[in-house]
Image: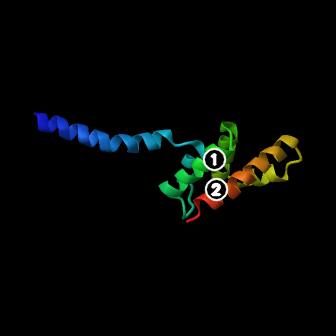
């Protein structure tokens, strides 16, 4: 009986971090993992999310995450004449450059 309880606890301890990482994934990481890009894997996507956490606010992260599924949204933002889009685009470019430098293997 005690062995069963300890075995169950050990399995739970091993699986808990895995379930937490999936549940705690941010919008960029989730979008990255869902993308069809060859380089998209848990390590790379988690790294990109870490950079997003350092460089983008939550709303910016959600907006940038949409670019993974629809790159045309990025183009529309880049071409926009709105000041708010220009400001976002500058933050997004900083995020992209930082992610490339920080996460490149």
Task: Tell me residue 5's x, y (percent).
Answer: 17, 34
Q: Quadrant of residue 7?
A: top left
Q: Earlier in the sequence, mark 1 or mark 2?
A: 1
Q: Viewer-proximal residue, 71 or 64? A: 64
Instruction: Name the secondary structure under disc 1.
Output: helix
Instruction: Please tell me the numbered disc located at residue 38.
Output: none
Q: How far apart are the two marked residues, 1 and 2, measured between alpha carbons?
A: 8 Å
Would residue 61 appear left or right of 45 to someone viewing this image? right
Q: Mark 2 Cα within 10 Å, few/some/many (few <14, many 20+)? A: some
Residue at figure coordinates x 64%, y 56% from the top left:
99
Task: Check the picture and name the quadrant holding the N terminus.
Answer: top left
Task: Tell me residue 87's x, y (percent).
Answer: 82, 44
Up-down relation of residue 62 to residue 45 (above or below): above
Q: What residue would you read off at disc 1? A: 52
Q: Quadrant of residue 27?
A: top right
Task: Check the picture and name the quadrant holding the C terminus.
Answer: bottom right
Q: What residue would you read off at disc 2? A: 99
Tally of numbered discs: 2
Up-down relation of residue 48 to residue 3 (above or below): below
Q: Mark 1 Cα within 10 Å, few/some/many (few <14, many 20+)? A: many
Task: Tell me residue 93's x, y (percent).
Answer: 74, 54
Residue at figure coordinates x 73%, y 50% from the top left:
92
């Amino acid at each position: 009986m005690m062995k069963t309880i300890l075995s169950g606890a050990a399995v739970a301890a091993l699986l808990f971090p895995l379930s937490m990482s999936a549940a705690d994934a941010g919008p960029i990481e989730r979008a990255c993992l869902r993308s069809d890009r060859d380089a998209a894997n848990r390590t790379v996507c988690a790294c990109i999310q870490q950079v997003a956490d350092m460089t983008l606010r939550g709303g910016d992260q959600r907006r940038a995450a949409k670019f993974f599924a629809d790159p045309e949204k990025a183009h529309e933002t880049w071409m926009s004449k709105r000041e708010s889009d220009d400001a976002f685009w500058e933050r997004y470019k900083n995020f992209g450059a930082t992610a490339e430098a920080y996460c490149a293997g």
